[in-house]
Amino acid sequence: MNGPEMPAARIDDDRYADLANGIRLHYASAGEPAGRKLIVFLHGFPEAWFAWEAQLAEFGKDHFAIAPDLRGFNLSAKPPEVAAYHIKHIAEDIRLLIEYLGHGSAIVVCHDWGGAVGWHLGIFHPDLVERLVVVNSPHPWLFMRELANNPVQQAASAYMNWLRAPGSEEGLVAGDFKIVERFLDAEDGTHPSWYTPEVRERYRAMWSVPGAPKADGAPSHAMTGGCNFYRATPLHPPTATEPARPLPAPGDWSLTMPVRVIWGETDRALTTGLIDGLDEVCPDLVLERIPEGSHWVVHEQPDRVNRLIRRFLVD
């Protein structure tokens, strides 16, 4: 018989790390830092560390669990240059954060743009990632393939080109945050049940944190950092002036560590074609499909996601 369940871990949401590359990251943590494995949770767009609050409370029971704000988001540094948001720089932040915390490696759990960071770390820094858990975030080679060849995925990703355009940050929050909230809304356009009035206020406060001052001294827009992720990436639907990239060899994008993917199949932005062939680049793969789950399955079914992560950690 199992013993009594451990109480949820207390979350400290007021921590900062000044990294060796000059970037200051805000992060939340749960659990004792000494003598425990490090587990890192990486959020996506348009979110912040608190997207992983239920996971911090759970995995802080027996890990040192952390969830940073990625650069450009919420309370972390927001460099003004678009080039500063290339995925290699975001991944370097996380590598340095793990080093800053005194660890040589970590379990990485990630979603959306955080997933892009996790995939990058797993491919290019395999010694840093003990296990990789990805929630609704496409492997980069499969994303390149689908953007080049699949009209359905090209249409689903069309919003990326809108976000890359000048002024998209102002458009996102115009009309009382109308457009940015559409990213979170259910398919019928209503706010999902997890997006309570309290959660809504938390998101709106995060979407309002200004960025670094511009050359004229005025603060940059709160959403510019997030939009710069899209402006900096070479992965986006082809346009008349930017055709699809030639596909590299898939073997150059393989991962050697255990990879566990949780995929909500009603994701409107990421089609299930993105998980076809995943085993070719992830030899040690477990894929958990959630037919009724959306892109926001972490919020919709936090207990189920926690159980799946738990199971993956002991496989």
Image (spheres, rainbow, N blue to C red):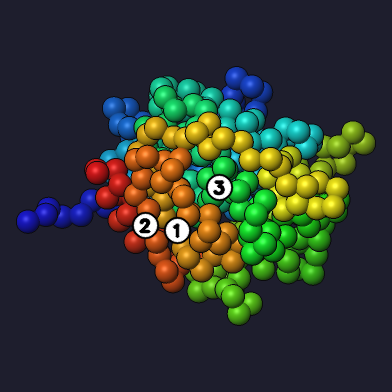
Looking at the rendered structure, the secondary structure element under dot 3 is helix
**Residue 208, quarter of the rendered image:** bottom right
- Identify which residue, 44 or 232, lies in the foreground: 232
Q: Which circle's residue, 3 or 2, is located before the other in the chain? A: 3
Q: Which amino acid, by three-letter code, is at mark 3?
A: Leu
Name the residue: 64% across, 22% down. Answer: 21
- Residue at 76 percent across and 60 percent down: it is 172
Task: Tell whether 265 sits left or right of 256.
Answer: right
| Circle 1 SS class | strand
Q: Residues within 10 Å of mark 2 (few under 14, many from 20)?
A: few
From where the camera sits, is residue 237 visible? yes
Going from N to C along the chain, the mark reached first, 3 or 1, is 3
Q: Is residue 304 left or right of residue 164?
A: left
Asked if marks 2 and 1 touch (Cβ < 8 Å), the reply is yes
In the rendered image, the quadrant that contains the C terminus is: top left
The amino acid pointed to by label 2 is Glu
Q: Which residue is mark 3?
A: 142
Q: CA distance from mark 2 to mark 1?
A: 6 Å
Screen quadrant of the N terminus: bottom left
Mark 3 → mark 2, Cα distance in angstroms: 17 Å
Can you give x and y, in whole percent of width and height, for residue 171 in the image? 81, 61
Task: Tell me which residue sits at (46%, 50%) in the image.
Answer: 277
Q: Which residue is mark 1?
A: 263
220 or 162: nearer the eye? 162
